[in-house]
Each structure stands twice: as structure tokens, then as C-alpha cells.
Amino acid sequence: MISSRSKRTINLFARLPGVGEKTAQRYLLYLLTAEDELAAELGRELVELRQHLRPCDLCGNIAEIDSLEAAAICTICSDSKRDKTLLCVVARVHDLLAIERAGSMRGRYFVLGKLLSPLEGVGPEDLPIERLLVRVKKEGIQEIICATPPSVDGEATALLLKRELAPFGVTLSRIASGVPHGGDLEFADPITMGRALAGRQRL
Amino acid sequence: MISSRSKRTINLFARLPGVGEKTAQRYLLYLLTAEDELAAELGRELVELRQHLRPCDLCGNIAEIDSLEAAAICTICSDSKRDKTLLCVVARVHDLLAIERAGSMRGRYFVLGKLLSPLEGVGPEDLPIERLLVRVKKEGIQEIICATPPSVDGEATALLLKRELAPFGVTLSRIASGVPHGGDLEFADPITMGRALAGRQRL
Ligand SMILES: [Zn+2]
Ligand SMILES: [Zn+2]
């Protein structure tokens, strides 16, 4: 008893990550009743989205482009104040944005897009290691921070990077894992607590 | 360090109910990387949304319209198999859709749009009571089910309806409140449990 057009809009919204039918329906009702112009504004933005935004050719971050033929270079890669000898390797663009919010990474990035995962059938050949090695050689990168997540797959990927980068003599480090800032020790899981202890630093 | 166009899209998404900056960012990244056509499809749908969908002139449900000048009558109101003497009064379109999913309400609806709320300064004059009374008179409605939520505001609204409808001699009922289907009695809050007891029916 809902019109076919509403149904179509709901189905499109429901293809977004984490959006079920009820959430999609809530978005639709809001757009129909609450803000007069929002549906059209958001619609115009999305129609042209992929003509203007694309993964950066160098790092994988979101880059704004002028035309479909133009090279896509993001604001981080084109920022001359960034340290070009320091590269931070992350799994996803989300991680890059989280690190940028912290504001202390002064180098550039490389987004792997996925993690090594034997269980899910993702092997070394599925990761853009070759592209990473080319950058290391071409750009004279001296230090690499591996910021893959502190998970089994994240650790496996870090070890793969270590092996692949060994011949290049770059300094490779791994972000620290431990009890989060503001976190209560009582609620830290045993693995986190183990890492916090193993990674202890002298005061 | 995110492009101004990404920022604009994120800000538009974040105006949807329950969507914060991180969720909006997740939607954007998904549209840019996962499904080639989804952004454009959803965009086209939203650009025209309010030219094709509008609240039903009679009940407030979503109605599909052919032109901006046309009357908006939803599929429920125009369904001749529905009992025209039975009306179900709800607070929001969401509630109407939830009742439709149950599939047992054979009459039509009236969406109030809001509930009486002395605390939030919503008085009887803010509710479309006059429009409801006009429908009752004109359409010869004999029975009204009040399906406002079992909350303070929902009960207050039910009492207001009772007072306003008294002169019309319609049968007015209120949906039952109690322990939900599949709900564990152990976890029912005291008010719900009190209602389940007070509303008990002979077996
Ligand atoms: Zn880049
Ligand atoms: Zn209707």
C-alpha cells in the first residue's frame, strides 16, 4: 500500500551501507515532509557525483576532478608542504580520514583498498603492492608508517609489507595498539590489554 | 583535507534524520567506490521526488501525483475495497505504514502529523482536528480507531479525540498496549506490565 515510486526510492536508499528498509523509509518521509529543497539539492549533487569525484590516482583518497579525462590528484598528494619522504599505508579511505582528523601525520598516504585475508581468500596478489613499491622507488620514500588495523588481517598485511619492503631499506613502523584515550581499563578486552602492556614505554 | 565538493555532499546527507558526519561520509565513499550507477540513479530519483510524491490530501499518507496541480490521493484512500466507515487515526505516516504491514486494518487513515504535547507547547489548535471532524461528517464514518502511541502525549491526544468526537456518536476505540509479541515478561517495564494486566481479556 505504498506507491511504486516510493518503493523505488526506498530500494535505492536501502542499497547504501547499513541502511535497511525502515531507515530508507524514514529518509524518504523526511525528504517529502520536512525540508522543501533537500531532496532536489541532494539529488543534483548525486547525479553528478562521479563526474566530479574519483579516487586519487596516487593514494586512493577522494579527489576532485574537472573532467573525466583529467588526472585525479587529491589535495593531500598535491600539498607541497607535506613530507614527500613519509608515506602512511592504510586499508581504507575511512582510515585515512580518521588519521587526518588527528592532524599529526605530515606525510602522504597509500590506500590498499583491502587487507590480506587468507580466510576470505584475499592473497598478496590481490593487494596493490606493486604500485606501492613503484612509488617507494620513484618518490624516494624513506619512511613508511603501516596503519592497518590491529586485527588478524591487519597484522598479516603489516607482515607482508615488511617482507616486500625489506629490499628497499625504508624505515617501517606500525601504529601503536593499546587502551584507547579515555577508555576504562576495566573494559579493555584481554588482547587490547596485552598489547597495551607489551607496548609499554619508559616514563 | 577533504575536497569542498565531498564536504558539500556529506553536509547534505547529514541533514537526513539520524545521519551524522561519519555516516554521511560512509555513504559518500560507498557511492564513489562500490556501485557505479547508484549515485546517479538515486540522484535522478531525488531531483524529481517532490514533483511526483506528496502527502495525500485526504489522509496524509504518501501519494503519487501526475502533475503539481493534480489532487494527491493515495492508493489506500482510492481503494474501493476499503471500509469507508472505519477510520484509523495515527500520529505519523511511519505508524500508518507499520499498521499496514500487519495487514488487518480494513478501513482508511487520518495522519495527525503531531501529538498533543503541553510540555512542548503543542496545543489542540495545532492538530488538524477540524479536518478530521469534517471527514467524519462528510464521509459518514461510524468507527474510529485511535492508534496514537502508548505514551503521555499519545494518551493525551486520545483523550482530546474522545472529547471532540463525543457529539458525533461514532464508536471510538484505542489500540491495546501490553507486552509485545515474543517479548520476555522479565524485561517488560512496569508501565507496560501494568497495561498488560489492566487490559487482560477473558480466555
Ligand atoms: Zn592522493
Ligand atoms: Zn490517503
Image: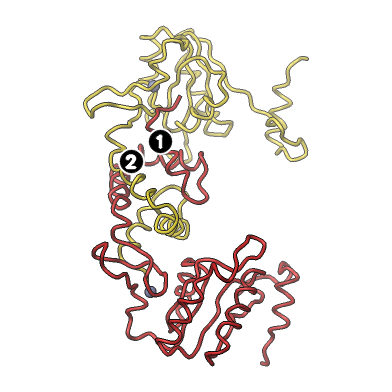
Chain colours: A yellow, B red
Name the residue beneath numbered marker 2.
A45
Q: Nearer the viewer, residue A59 or B51?
A: B51
Residue A23, percent from left and from top? 47, 56
Residue B11 shown left or right of residue B190 in the figure: left
User: Disc 2 versus disc 1: distance between alpha carbons?
Assistant: 8 Å
Category of crowding for the residue at label 1, using alpha-carbon neighbours closer than 10 angstroms: few (below 14), some (14–19), many (at least 20): few
Under tag 2, what secondary structure? Answer: helix
Say which quadrant the C terminus of chain B sits in.
bottom right
Which residue is nearer to you in this view: A18 or A46?
A46
Seen in the image, is B111 located left or right of residue B184?
Answer: left
Using the rendered view, name the quadrant where residue B34 is placed: top left
> In this picture, is A80 found above or below A128?
above
Give the image quadrant in which the ligand numbered 1 is located: top left
Q: Residue at x 40, y 33 (%)?
A: B6
Farthest residue in the front direction? B125
Q: Amino acid at mark 2?
A: Glu
Residue at the extreme left: A69
Residue A131: percent from the left, percent from the top? 35, 20
Q: Is residue B175 left or right of residue A197?
A: left
Give the number of the disc on residue B8.
1
Q: In the depicted view, which residue is nearer to us: A184 or B79?
A: B79
Residue B97 in the image, given as x and y percentages of width and height: 45, 70
Residue under mark 2: which chain is it in? Answer: A
Element assignment for label 1:
helix
**Mark 2: C-beta under 8 Å from nearest atom of ligand 1:** no
User: Looking at numbered disc 1 in the image, what kind of residue is underneath it?
Assistant: Arg
Q: Which sits in the foreground, A150 or A185?
A: A185
Q: Chain of mark 1?
A: B
Q: Position of residue A59 (x, y in %)?
A: 39, 22
